[in-house]
Amino acid sequence: MRMRADMNDVNLHYFLRPDHQDAARIWAATSSMVLPDVEFHERRGWLFNQIEDLHERGANTIVAIDAVNGRLRGFVTVHPVTKQLHNLVVAPEALGSGLAKLLLTEARDIAPARIAVDVVRHNARALRFFEREGFRRIGEGSDALTGDGTVKLEWRA
């Protein structure tokens, strides 16, 4: 099922503990599409810990819930002080729907002047998305979970 992402199709709210399981499910499914050799389903606990740690340090996570069936379709985590976008995840069935752009708009509301993000270098789809949305490459790094190389991107208003 392909969904169109607009305010009539999804409800946005701040991340709640009941969202954990669905967030981990879509994170693992989407991440496995980019790095199929990594067992993301076995690493879902890492995501729980990361989000809780980020929230304790002041980050915000916005989730998109399908207005028809109530399922989580995506989420974005951004820190309003550090301006770092930590997660922008869209369920596989919602890829290409415009949901990522809607979630990025929410992130820009939280950090309106600047956002930095690290994208795994193998994630061509995400790199194209961020560059299309005005992000510029500013460096390289390494992913803490997988050790893969990343591309550092930054957007400025």
Image (tube, helix red, strand yellow):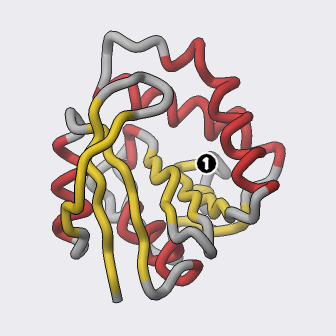
**Above or below: residue 146 compared with residue 22:** above
Q: What residue did someone put label 1 on?
A: 72
Relative image position of residue 2 (x, y in whole percent):
34, 49
Q: In which quarter of the image is residue 81?
A: bottom right
Q: Which of 48 and 2 is in front in this view?
A: 48
Relative image position of residue 112 (x, y in whole percent):
49, 86
Q: In which quarter of the image is residue 68?
A: bottom right
Q: Indicate the secondary structure of the residue bearing disc 1.
A: strand
Give the quadrant of the N terminus.
top left
| Residue beneath the point at 50% across and 19% down | 40
Q: In which quarter of the image is residue 130?
A: bottom left
Number of labels in the image equals 1
Q: Nearer the viewer, residue 20 or 149?
A: 149
| Residue beneath the point at 59% across and 19% down | 43
Would residue 18 appear left or right of 42 to someone viewing this image?
A: right
Give the quadrant of the C terminus.
bottom left
Kind of residue sitting beneath label 1: Leu
Would residue 33 appear left or right of 74 to someone viewing this image?
A: left
Relative image position of residue 34 (x, y in whole percent):
29, 29
Q: Which of 134 and 81 is in front in this view?
A: 81
Would residue 28 appear left or right of 54 to someone viewing this image?
A: left
| Residue beneath the point at 33% across and 64% down | 98
| Residue beneath the point at 38% across and 38% down | 92
Relative image position of residue 104 (x, y in whole percent):
43, 69
Q: Tell me the crowding category of disc 1: few under 14, some 14 to 19, or many 20 or more residues within 10 angstroms, Cα based.
A: many
